[in-house]
Image: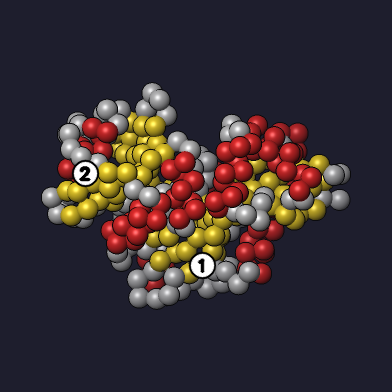
Amino acid sequence: MAECRHALPGEREQTHRLWQQVFGDEPQAQEVFYDLCAPQGPLVLVEAGQVACMLALTPVELALPGCTASRGTYLYALATRPDCRGKGYAARLIACAAAWTQEQGLDFVCTVPAQPSLFTFFSKNSFTPAFYHLRVPLPAPQAGPVEPLTPQAYGALREELLGNIPHIVHSPGQIAFEGQLHGALYRLDLAHGPACAVVEDWGDHAVVKELLCLPGDEEEGARRISHLCRGRGELRTPCGRAEGLPFGAIRWLHEPPTPWQQLARGYLGLALD
């Protein structure tokens, strides 16, 4: 009989292998994630003593204008062993993750589907597309100073710049995880004030996972960060739902707060994708 629970210490090697098989990350990088983002370790579905499916849950908040932030968990690194696919194990583990989150007195689970086609899978598991962004090529570069930021300083500036936009609030540990692996955290001082950006360098291209700035500074900020990336790669920025691409999905565990019911959209940005 299959069982869902947090992984036992002796099962960590199995979860390491499964994560690496599906996503490519070495065990050391996985342990960095657990240390910074999910100290309780992975949630697993075990059948006949073997880990068949896994995911990790890391705490986040959803900041909403005019009300107290909602609290939830970010579903990350959902992976099923190839020989166990098609048995409904991923859906069962997601249900377990939602139940565990609700038992903690939290409000929602959210996730970033690994590819657009998976929004259909998550919709079948009670998730709704909820977080949108724009994704565009980097513009022509423009030289200018940038300053590295600590995770704590980045998080504080990020909250200032997002203001009244409904958005996922990431912990210093999640921001540090982003910066320690492929990414780096930056501050830019632009015409109307400070901006912040996260850049992942993948060798042949860069991904600016978010660029946040004051109104009127969008073009200057994009060109400045493009110079840092040598003009190669893509840029992600906040947007409204009408013109943006769906990026993340949410599953509420009770009636959503009134501001969310009115908007039903927000910004996730600095995702662990």
Kindly give the residue lying farthest to the left in the view shown. 191
Which label is found at residue 255? Answer: none
**Residue that appears at 39% across and 69% down:** 64
Return the residue nearer the eye: 72 or 25.
25
- Is 66 located above or below residue 226 in the figure? below
Structural distance between the alpha carbons of marks 1 and 2: 31 Å
| Residue 227 spot, x, y in % from top left | 23, 32
Task: Sort mark 1 into few (<14), some (14-19) or many (20+) by Cα contacts within 10 Å.
Answer: some
Residue 246 position (above or below residue 169): above
Could you tell me if the residues under marks 1 and 2 are in contact, i.e. CB atoms within 8 Å?
A: no
Judged left or right of residue 183, residue 51 is: right
Residue 272, x across and y down, in percent:
49, 46
Q: Amino acid at mark 2?
A: Gly
Q: How is the image coloured?
A: secondary structure
Q: Is residue 162 visible?
A: no
Total residue callouts: 2
Secondary element type, mark 1: strand
In this rendering, position of residue 89 left or right of residue 124: right
Instruction: Give the residue number, with chain letter if any, for mark 1.
Output: 71
Task: Note whether 131 is above or below 260 in the view shown.
Answer: above
Is disc 2 placed on a helix, strand or loop?
helix
- Residue at mark 2: 221
User: Compared to 171, does 188 lie above or below?
Assistant: above
Q: Residue 51 in the image: x percent, y percent?
A: 76, 43
Asked whether 79 or 85 is in front, the reply is 79
Most foreground residue, 121 or 15: 15
Which sits earlier in the primary sequence, circle 1 or circle 2? 1
Q: Residue furthest top?
A: 204
Q: How many residues crowd around disc 2 within 10 Å: few (fewer than 14), some, or many (20 or more)?
A: many
Residue under the image location 39 percent in, 76 percent down: 67
Residue at 63 percent across and 69 percent down: it is 104
